[in-house]
Image (cartoon, coloured by chain):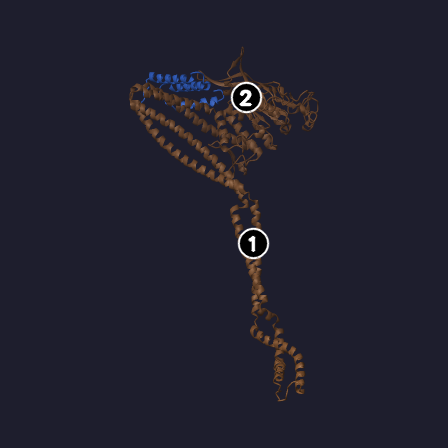
Amino acid sequence: MATMPQRQALEIIREMARQTPELYRGYRDELIGTMVEIMSLESVKSHGFAKEIGRKIEVLGEKLEREGYREE
Amino acid sequence: MKLKRASIRNFKLLRNIELQFSTQKELPLTVIRAENGSGKTSSLLALKWGLYGRKKLSDPSVRLSPADWPDGDQCAISVTIEFIHTHVSQESGSMLSVEEEYVLTREVNETPKGDFPNRSPEEVYLYRKTTSGTERIDEIELSRMLPEPMVDIFFTNGDAAMTFISPQLPESTKQEKVRSAIREMLGLEKLEDVARRLKSVRGNVNREIGSATSSEELAFVTKELERMEGRREELASSLADLEAGISKTEQDLGETERRLHSALEAGNYKDLSLRKQQRCRDMAKVLQETEECKKQQQALLQSKTMAWGLIGESLQRGYNRLRELRQKGVIPRAAVPILQERLEMRECICGADLSPGTPAHSQVESMLAVQRTKDQHVELLSTLYFQAQNEVQESRTPEDGGWKLESRKLRQVRVSIEDRKRGLDNELKSIDGKLSDIDENLVQELIAHQSMLRKTQEKHRDDRFRTSSQLEGLGEKIGQLEKKLEALRRKDDKVRKLNLQMRALEDLTGIVHGTLGEMQNVYLGRVSKRMEAMFMNVIGADPEQGSIYQGAKITSEYDIVVESVDGRTLSPDSEVNGASQRALTFAFIWALTEVSGVVAPRIIDTPLGMMSGGVKERVLEMVSKPARLDVDRQVVLFLTQSEIAQTEEILDSRVGASMTLTKTDDFPTDLVYDPRASRSEVRVCECSHRQCCSCCQRHSSQSFNLRFRD
């Protein structure tokens, strides 16, 4: 994210995450962390980065299951 | 990014120079003074080439080596730039700014050959300075520090400082430049990349859901939804293209109609030709009437009525005299016939013998001879009498003289015809004049082009309507399918885990889209407001004092417009003066970089050209003033001495680094001292805007009160 107005973008991401339901304790922070990692991977676009992003989504899903979240 | 130093070798006349830049926060300004032709533009190009390469030069094929480099000799050209770059990273939940130093070198070998030099591929070396030395890194990092779409933001040629409002560019190109600059500066494209990536992952998860379940219906709906979303994207893209096409066609149509109107100011060729033909026919008719009138007048002149009218009195007197003679018996004379008859009868009326030889016969013959002489005159008079008698009876006219009335009438008709003829003559001359002014070929060409554009416009509008309708319909269908898919997914327990991933994906997508929307709406508004404030301040316009400029803004279509009284907007490229256009462009660039907080060098060549007085001072204030404490800035200005004039005090308080470029060729015309140069080149000295030295002193230096520096 070298040339983005990084502070502004991250602040807004945090603000948007605050509007997301906290499906379990720490869910929002997990979302923010995953978002920042995805943005970094997207900037660098190193080998296999797309799979890496997919893996991060899987991890989030597994966490949701472990924390007992159920879709209604 | 902030530049520290640049070394330039063999780039045009910059054979071997080094530029130092100010990196101080409180004194962010670097002034490089140079007169016309002394390397300002070459320096800017060298920096641009060094950072971006040949592809970002306005003419990638332009020769880079010095103009006097011999044909066939290889020239090694290089630009080395040392710079500092700050990036932000998140560690342990907090954000850290990290400053690192880099060295970038770009090299190329060029062998001049006439107008088309041979050039080797460019070599780029990027190193990061570490505590233990330097570490080479991928040059792709450079494009992240200074993305290419921002080149027009960071490198500005003051003479062409209207990239975003230039009249030479079509509306759609200007809008795209503004849009691209804003999006790049605010990092919107990065976020959109993430949004697209998440969408792609979502598609993968959907497919997995479709294949993980035994439900055929779920698989079908998933596939159908994917297909429809693909189609929706296609339609949206087509619609955007059509909008752009309509906008372009409207612009072209306006331009064509304007040109046509201008060409037709002299008149319509066809109409004028028809009028001319009509007037020629009218003229032929008038000429014919003239002939008719002449004939009638001639007839009248030849008529007995007029003749009697003109000489009737004299004729009457003559006739009266003849009548008197008749009454007296003088005419007609019948003596000769009677005498002859008697001679033939040989007997007089009185009975006397008139045989030949008799005295009476001789007497009568003498009388006859005398009578014959007298009778010639009387005969003439008698003839006249009888003729006059007939003529007088035939030609006697009433006392009121009808021929006079007719003559007057014919004269009036003749005058009227002459007037009409004169009028027609004048009109025909006028029509001929107008016809000669019309360029009929151009008019026909423009009419044909106008017709073609209207048809194109019509077609585009039809297509747009059709595509819009299709898009709307498709949106509804997708909405229905999504509801259906959601319901199917929930039912299937096998896809529960994938559903959880989908939930996380939806939340992440919501965050990205929300961030994009916020940055776009809020930051576009912030940039627009800041631009307006800067612009109005620089040009000294006060809306409350009735200034013609009431404000400036960036519209949601990314147009930069200037607002005037009564809610009207002014076109910056045609209704705003040159100095204000520059001020507007600078205000946009400065507002964008200020709001975005991007730290990058802003390099401007000749920013104060076309400006004077208060506007000049305020522009310089705007570009050189340190921003807020939390917003760093670096500004490099290439200025001539004339631009610097009357701004010295502002520069005194803002300049952190300064130098002067001088071209050796300017001796002896402009330079005082002989540079003793074996070849034409640009040299650098450390003279500030108030100084001169043996390297840069010019004959004009005294008039600018420059202090000589040993």
Image quadrant in which you'd find residue B415: bottom right
* Secondary-structure class at tag 1: helix
The numbered mark 2 sits on a residue in which chain? B
- Which residue is at the front of the view, B404 or A62? B404
Q: Residue furthest top?
A: B132
What amino acid is labelled 2 in the image? Answer: Gly
Label 1 CA crowd tier, 10 Å (few <14, some 14–19, many 20+): some
* Placement of B26 over or under B271, stated as above or below: above
- Which residue is at the front of the view, B578 or B253? B253
* Secondary-structure class at tag 2: loop
Tell me where residue B39 appears, x and y as whole percent.
62, 24
Q: Residue furthest bottom?
A: B351
Image quadrant in which you'd find residue B18: top right
What amino acid is labelled 1 in the image? Answer: Leu
Q: Is residue B471 left or right of residue B620?
A: left
Tell me where residue B513 appears, x and y as whole percent.
41, 25
Q: Which mark is residue B53?
A: 2
State the separation of the CA atoms marked 1 and 2.
73 Å
Q: Which mark is residue B686?
A: none
